[in-house]
Image: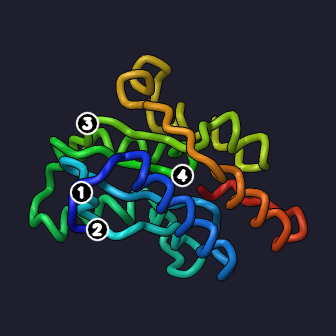
Amino acid sequence: MTKPTTLHTIMVEAVHQCIQHVDSGGLPFVGVVVQSGVAVSNFGFNRVYETGDASAHAEVVAMRDAMSRLKCSDLSGTVLLATGEPCGLCYRFAQNCGVDAIYVAADREEAASWGFDYHSSYALFGITDDMRAQFYRALPVPDRYEPFARYLEISGGHTSDLE
């Protein structure tokens, strides 16, 4: 994306990209970094299984891509869009990188209801409810549950705690 647009429009596209990723065998999570209405990263897909890198969560992949493209290590002035609320690792990474806010299509309770319960990761990474409240912004969009539903259909109901 090169022209400014709305966060809602980018999130709708992120969910669409997530559905395609699930259809090709991936996990139902996508992240993208946005600055001034423009995506400054590619859509980041969860690549834990493909790469064997336990930190290759969708949001981390997107933030790494943004830092590479922007040639920086500080993402101040950006926001992170996530199709499913990030786990503790991703919240901590976003905080450490200076991301201003995290917009979420499906929150952690919704993700847990689909079998992706990573509540325990918050304490492991020191993510308190107060810290989460500083970053978290709900941005529900149509079809936000479709990646989860398709994943369960394709996997035969098997979920993973790897977000």
Q: Horizontal and vertical percent for residue 125?
A: 45, 38
Q: Between tags 2 and 4, which lies in front?
A: 2
Residue at mark 3 to residue at mark 4: CA–CA distance: 17 Å
Residue tagged by mark 3?
100
> Which residue type carries mark 3?
Asp
Residue tagged by mark 4?
83
Is residue 31 positioned above or below 128 on the image? Answer: below
Is residue 135 positioned above or below 39 on the image? Answer: above
Q: Earlier in the sequence, mark 2 or mark 3?
A: 2
Do the CB atoms of the residues marked 1 and 2 lie less than 8 Å apart?
Answer: yes
Dot 3, crowdedness within 10 Å: few (<14), some or many (≥20)?
Answer: some
Q: Earlier in the sequence, mark 1 or mark 4?
A: 1
Q: What number is the disc on residue 38?
A: 1
Q: Circle 2 sits in a helix, a strand or a loop, which is it?
A: loop
> Which residue type carries mark 4?
Thr
Q: Is residue 158 left or right of residue 49?
A: right
> Which residue type carries mark 2?
Met
Q: Circle 1 sits in a helix, a strand or a loop, which is it?
A: strand
Dot 4, crowdedness within 10 Å: few (<14), some or many (≥20)?
Answer: many
Is residue 4 positioned above or below 43 on the image? Answer: above
Dot 1, crowdedness within 10 Å: few (<14), some or many (≥20)?
Answer: some
Q: What number is the disc on residue 119?
A: none
Q: What number is the disc on residue 1?
A: 2
Q: Between tags 1 and 4, which lies in front?
A: 1
Residue at mark 1 to residue at mark 2: CA–CA distance: 6 Å
Dot 2, crowdedness within 10 Å: few (<14), some or many (≥20)?
Answer: few
Image quarter of residue 77: top left
Image quarter of residue 118: top right
Residue at mark 2 to residue at mark 4: CA–CA distance: 18 Å
Q: Earlier in the sequence, mark 1 or mark 2?
A: 2
